[in-house]
Image (cartoon, rainbow, N blue to C red):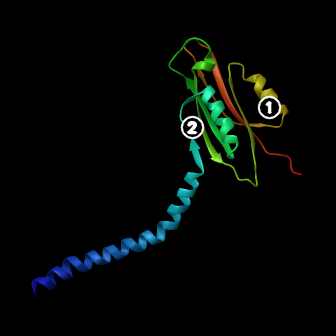
Amino acid sequence: MTLNQIIWDSIIMPASKLLTTLIGFAILISPIIQVNAIAAAKTGTTGWVTGYEAIRLGKSRDRYGIVPTKIQCKNGKNNRGDFRKNLLVKVDYRFQDKKKPIYWAAAWHTAMKQFEIKYKRKGFKMVSRDSYVRGSGLRVHCALWHKKPKKK
């Protein structure tokens, strides 16, 4: 047996079989990867933004068919003054199916009960809620509601 045959049999052939196996595995799982990538592209988050920025983002995203799915809130850096200026919110969202639209509403306030009553009367269902306590002891709530449109 020559040195070339030894190298061929012990290194080249096993490497080519491994490469063939890896390529086959990649072809096999590529549809799974594509499906997960498509699902991931249909969701997102705002990151932590002020309440005012969240309102602006919500209005602009309405046009693009984005539905918030989860809301979180926390206190900003400044612990004094109007809570609305210091509030930070983080909203997770998804793109809605045009065949199954969803109306949504969001609110953040110290007295959340009034919003719960208001949106319940309008047929909305609360889907996400969070709260935090400021340094002063004031509890601030944030919530998100969804409503399916009436069938025609």
Task: Report x, y in % for residue 125.
Answer: 76, 37
Q: Which residue is drawn at the image coordinates 89% and 51% (left, top)? A: 152
For mark 1, what is the residue?
119
In the rendering, which numbered label is found on residue 131? none
Relative placement, left or right, of 32 versus 55 is left
Task: Report x, y in % for residue 89.
Answer: 59, 29
Q: Amino acid at mark 2?
A: Thr
Relative placement, left or right, of 102 versus 152 is left
Q: Vertical placement of 151 versus 74: above or below?
A: below
Q: Are marks 1 and 2 in contact (CB under 8 Å)?
A: no
For mark 2, what is the residue?
46
Q: Which residue is drawn at the image coordinates 63% and 26% (left, top)? A: 52
Q: How dense is the environment of label 2, judged by Cα within 10 Å: few (below 14), some, or many (20 and up)?
A: some
Q: How dense is the environment of label 1, judged by Cα within 10 Å: few (below 14), some, or many (20 and up)?
A: some
Task: Report x, y in % for residue 31.
Answer: 52, 67
Residue 143, by quadrant, is top right
Number of labels in the image equals 2
- Separation of disc 1 and disc 2 at Cα? 24 Å
Residue lying furthest bottom in this view? 1
Task: Report x, y in % for residue 73.
Answer: 59, 28
Q: Amino acid at mark 1?
A: Tyr
Q: Which residue is drawn at the image coordinates 85% and 32% (left, top)? A: 121
Q: Vertical placement of 68 versus 97: above or below?
A: above
